[in-house]
Image (cartoon, rainbow, N blue to C red):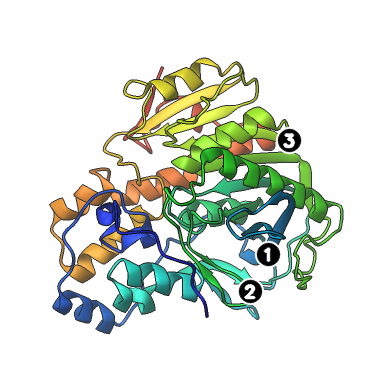
Amino acid sequence: MTTTPFISRKGMTRRRVLGAALAAGAAVPLATGADLAAAKSAPTRLMLPVPTGPHPVGTVPLHLVDRSRPDHIAGPGHFRELMATVWYPARDVQRYPVAPWMPAGALQALLTNAGFGELTPLGPLSAGHVGAPVRRSGRRLPVVVFSHGAHSHQGDHTVMVQELASHGYAAVTVAHQYDTYTEFPNGRIVVPIDDEQAPTLPGDFAADLRFVLDCVEQLAAGRNPDVDHRELPAGLLGSLDPRRMGAFGWSKGGTATASAMLADERIRAGLSLDGPMQMKPPLTGDLDRPFMMMSAEYTRATHPEVAAFWSHLRGWRLNIQAQGAAHISYGDNEALFPQVAKLLGWSKKQLQDVIGTLDPDQAVKIQQAYPLAFFDKHLRHRRGHLLDGPSPAFPAVTFLP
């Protein structure tokens, strides 16, 4: 197993607790050796909530190379290389193994560099069954692609991704090379490298998303885009609908979603999870397709780039905010960090310093319900009322004018 150089310790205090593994957004004191020993001996592992949809979930990794984009970091003759994962409604899942939240090698590297290597055995499992056959219902599956945040990983919003898959979507996550933790089929582990050495910008993320859309079109046409030609799950080829594609992303990935949508009309609906909308050059141009923003810290009131992007939305638009949410609240952190806090004996304040004051159970339900309602409305044209205004089921969610 080989590992690319790890990002320098500069700026790593924001990820000291479970480090970048859980994409932490606030500093919390490091655990003691006794804390780590207790966690290691705990008779359990971290758990993700079960998706609420009617379908079991299947998943498969894809090894992709974009030969239109030379990789100047890797050197001459190399091109942009990515790992992606497709999540989908499945059938007959019992014979297929459950996928981990992250590949084991990537999780080990991530936690070790954050000082929490002993927690690696507690890595959660997803609801996805690797290689399970696709559930075919006579109609192709709508597709959503997901872009992670800076120095994060493609599994950091598995709660949302597997929720969408359980409701009949094909969700495709992408690991943005040089700004992520992931593992390639040959065992090679990659982790973020220093931005000063090789900056990976939101525009690079956006280009990755557009390339993944190309790969979705190949799958829809019955062609396998995996460069290793690995066998795909039964029923996947020809099951995706390239006419109903959306995109969403968290933080830097939210900015990339906006950028990709401005450049590519194949994205019929876009969702930003607290994206800062900061790019050089700035995001410009009007957007006439549906776009939704779930705000926490990067609000229109506090960040002019977010307000400027909002002002250029000419189609259906919606901006909601969960009171008490932190930047990392719209993701798996709300499910995982309370368990970590219990294992390591954090106080309530220490936990809230990381995930905010929004009730974690409510936060999980919000991230399961609102993205699904958005894509149901604009990719499936299903009528619902959750996006019409405040709901008594979600008292923390406010609709921003």
The residue indicated by pointer 2 is 185
Secondary structure category for the residue under label 2: loop
Q: Is residue 378 above or below residue 175?
A: above
Label 1 neighbourhood size at 10 Å, few (<14), some (14-19), many (20+)? some
User: Counting residues from the N terminus, which is met first, the one under dot 1 or under dot 2?
Assistant: 1
Q: Amino acid at mark 3?
A: Arg
User: Counting residues from the N terminus, which is met first, the one under dot 2 or under dot 3?
Assistant: 2
Spatial distance from mark 1 to mark 2, Cα to Cα?
A: 8 Å
Q: Determine the image quadrant of residue 242.
A: top right
Secondary structure category for the residue under label 1: strand
Q: Amino acid at mark 1?
A: His
Q: Determine the image quadrant of residue 257.
A: top right
Q: Verify CB contact (< 8 Å) between mark 1 and mark 2.
A: yes
Residue closest to the eye, 200 or 88: 200
Residue in view at x 45 percent, y 52 percent: 197
Q: Position of residue 228 (x, y in %)?
A: 75, 71
Q: Position of residue 248 (x, y in %)?
A: 55, 41
Residue closest to the eye, 128 or 249: 249
Q: Amino acid at mark 2?
A: Pro
Residue closest to the eye, 313 or 58: 313
Residue in view at x 21 percent, y 52 percent: 27
Residue 46: in sight, yes or no? no
The residue indicated by pointer 3 is 266
Residue in view at x 56 percent, y 32 percent: 258
Q: Is residue 262 above or below residue 143?
A: above
Q: Position of residue 115 (x, y in %)?
A: 27, 70
Label 2 neighbourhood size at 10 Å, few (<14), some (14-19), many (20+)? few
Q: Position of residue 288 (x, y in %)?
A: 65, 20
Label 3 neighbourhood size at 10 Å, few (<14), some (14-19), many (20+)? some
Q: Verify CB contact (< 8 Å) between mark 1 and mark 3.
A: no
Q: Verify CB contact (< 8 Å) between mark 2 and mark 3.
A: no
The residue indicated by pointer 1 is 63
